[in-house]
Image: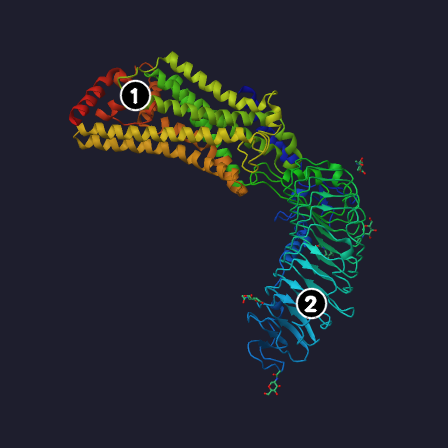
Amino acid sequence: MFTLATQFLSFVFLCGRMDEAVSEYVVFKNSKVCTDGYFQCANDTLCVEQGKICNSVEDCKDGSDERNCEDVHDNNYFDQMVRKNPSAEHDDDDQNCALSFNGTGCLCRSRGLYCRNLNLDVAPDIPDEEIDILDFTGNNFTSLSSRTLETLPNTVKKLILKHCNIKEVLSGTFYKTYTLSQIYLDNNQLKVFPSDLFNPENALRDLIVSYNEIEIIEENAFVNLKYLIELDLRGNKITDINLRAFEPLKSLSTLYLQNNLIKYVLSGSFPRMSFLTTLWLTENRIKLIEAEAFENLDYLMSLHLSDNRLTELRNGTFLNLDKLQSLSLNDNFIKSMELGVFTDVPNLTSLKLENNKFRILDKKLLQPLNKLENIYFDSFEMCTAATHVRNCFPKGDGISSQDHLLDNIILRSCVWIMGAIGCTGNLIVLLGRLLGPSNNIVHSLYLRNLAFSDLLMGVYLFTIASVDQEYRGHYLRHQYKWRHSFLCNICGFLSTLSCESSVLILSLVTWDRFISVTQPLARKQPSPRTAALTLLVLWMAAALVALAPLSNFASSYFGDEFYGSNGVCLSLHIHEPYAMGWEYSATMFILVNAFALVFISYAYVRMINEIKASGVACRSTRQSEERDKVAQRFGIIVLTDSLCWVPIIIVKLVALFGVAIPPDLYAWLAIFVLPINSALNPILYTLTTTVFKKQVRKLANKCISKRKRPEHVHSASESGFSLSFGVFPLGGSSRRILSHRGTQSSITASKNSWKRSTAV
Ligand SMILES: *[C@@H]1O[C@H](CO)[C@@H](O)[C@H](O)[C@H]1NC(C)=O
Ligand SMILES: *[C@@H]1O[C@H](CO)[C@@H](O)[C@H](O)[C@H]1NC(C)=O
Ligand SMILES: *[C@@H]1O[C@H](CO)[C@@H](O)[C@H](O)[C@H]1NC(C)=O
Ligand SMILES: *[C@@H]1O[C@H](CO)[C@@H](O)[C@H](O)[C@H]1NC(C)=O
Ligand SMILES: *[C@@H]1O[C@H](CO)[C@@H](O)[C@H](O)[C@H]1NC(C)=O
């Protein structure tokens, strides 16, 4: 406690100097080079820290730190992921028909014929004129052959055969229509992509065969397609990449193979395709990429390998890809990467690595990538391994950012305010109870312990706020050191200890009241000694729970980041619900809290009922009014407990079921909701009560006239029991029922017996 207090004070003193000592920029007057982690503004010698680039605040005088923030490759990634409807390009065409077609069914617009959903099984007569688009979407061709398309003139440019229930395509189908430049065969039921479909004279540029059931691509499937630029095979059941089949595609520039069943990319899987710039292999089952797998694709600029099952990347995987600019490896299971794996891709500008298994990166790994501009990780902490990259994502985790431990200004103020309320409120309760007269020792003991437990939360909040102040503006550089520091572990310990002990003590207090209200005769009030012993056991249990993650012998289970997994040193683990030691965290935050909550709610409902039932005997309206007040206060206590625990239990559960929790919500839970009880408990249980106010007034009076003796004994006894219940201006029978066995229990007992007699 004492060391913490001095720590805190030293932070407070430090922060005043910090702001002056470290300016936002490191200026090199003569050279034009910024140190690692800083980036130069466009027109001056200022250097801006990585976290301040593209953070929507202009730090350079010319604002150049907020320019070039778009990742072109990332935009392309999402653009290419979904293919546009082929006829959408013709939406703006002239509505009038420019063809001499006068058959029925088909719609003619400009130079396009739209024969959709006509249940045709052969193509109708089509005029021999220049046709831009011939759309057969939704017909029933079943088997496609040169006979089916016999009536097509060889003047059509774009042929659309999607959703046509096509089960097979026979050889030579497109022999006659060799002028076609685009063929759409997507969303059919092809199982085999047959060989020899195309005329040697063909000029086909785009072939779309996505969302079929293709398992086999015959060896000569793409023969003669020497002008093909785009081949779309996504959404099929391809298991192997057929080297021979792709060989004729000398002009191919984009190959879509995503959403197939490919497991391995072996060395030399791809033939030399010296114009291939974009290769999609996302959403496959790729476990292994052999070294030199892409060595023949030396023109490749984008390689997408996301959503696969990669676990490691070895040296040489990207051999020969020195033109590669964008590489996506997100959504895999990558645990390890050999240090030399990126030396072959020096021109990379965008690298996606999010949603993988690795948690730390060697700084040397990304060092060869000196043209890298955008990099994407799971957590902003990993940006420490990429300080030479201008734009590192994510920028924060909801609580912290690359700049600050507590990023949000409201959150930050909340930490200070809740810390202040928690500390002062509980200190006042502690001191007040030490100084003030106490008639009911046991209850005073309970409340003092509760106040101490809540005080720990206040200390925790103050410590976090001070550390935030110390690292303000440069958090990224210090975050690793901080999260693994002794103080962070102490913070985690304090917050856990406070939470658990507070829950346990609240349950104990409730239990005590519950027994005294429901069975006034059955049980005597515990002696101060028993109470102290019970409390000691509770504290030890809570301390054990909080200490376990720090112990050496269980470190293999908890890892070294159980408390330090985030900047506020909480083991709530909502971001990564299955991080090391998650069962422990789940038990702590879900089971214990839920159990306590259910018990406390149940107990208070029973007690209120009991009081109401006993109220049958009372006639006066004043007494019934008081009953309502008691019920109200009970309600408030249960409500604040729920306010604190229910959201945490729910969010934690939901996170365990795999729902992504918005980072902001997490931040509010951790910083605002979790400690709210600690700040409110002293107010609810002690401070707002009239007896407390009376006591304060009395104390003040005493100070003024020291000789004056405290008022009569009755008020002291009243304060004793009132404080213990947090239920204040009580009088008459309801007070007696709530109060302790001692003097009043006989009255309660007689009331109960009265109840019994009326019930008979
Ligand atoms: C840098 O200054 C030059 C001339 O002073 C100006 O033309 C240019 O737009 C400036 N660049 C930026 C990024 O502000
Ligand atoms: C369209 O109608 C004209 C007469 O109105 C006829 O001469 C011509 O052959 C028809 N064309 C087609 C393609 O049916
Ligand atoms: C499509 O054609 C086949 C025979 O060619 C037929 O059996 C099937 O019922 C047709 N489907 C529809 C939806 O008309
Ligand atoms: C991979 O390459 C790096 C750097 O070139 C080298 O240090 C490392 O030993 C290599 N690893 C293996 C297994 O060859
Ligand atoms: C890629 O990097 C190499 C040097 O490693 C360089 O010679 C080449 O011009 C770069 N290519 C592009 C497209 O930037």
Residue 297, percent across and down?
A: 79, 53
Residue 516, disc: 1
In this rendering, does residue 402 appear at all? Answer: no
Earlier-in-chain disc, 1 versus 2: 2
In this rendering, does residue 47 appear at all? Answer: yes
* Residue in front for this viewpoint, 668 or 36: 668
Q: Quick one: label 2, few (<14), some, or many (20+) residues within 10 Å?
A: many
Q: CA distance from mark 1 to mark 2?
A: 85 Å
Residue 203, percent across and down?
A: 75, 69
* Residue in front for this viewpoint, 546 or 231: 231
Q: Quick one: label 1, few (<14), some, or many (20+) residues within 10 Å?
A: many
Residue 376, percent across and down?
A: 66, 45
Q: Would residue 361 be found to the left or right of residue 461 on screen?
A: right
Specify the amino acid type for callout 1: Ser
Specify the amino acid type for callout 2: Gln
Residue matched to label 2: 182
> Which element type, helix, strand or loop, lies under badge 2?
strand
Q: Would residue 300 be found to the left or right of residue 232 on screen?
A: right
Q: Residue at (43%, 31%) from the top-left corner?
A: 594
- Reply above or below: 181 against 724: below
Residue 450, percent across and down?
A: 42, 23
Q: Are marks 1 and 2 in contact (CB under 8 Å)?
A: no
- Reply above or below: 743 against 392: above
Which of the 4 image quadrants contains residue 329? top right
* Residue in front for this viewpoint, 566 or 469: 566
Which of the 4 image quadrants contains residue 750? top left
Which of the 4 image quadrants contains residue 95? bottom right
Q: How is the image coloured?
A: rainbow
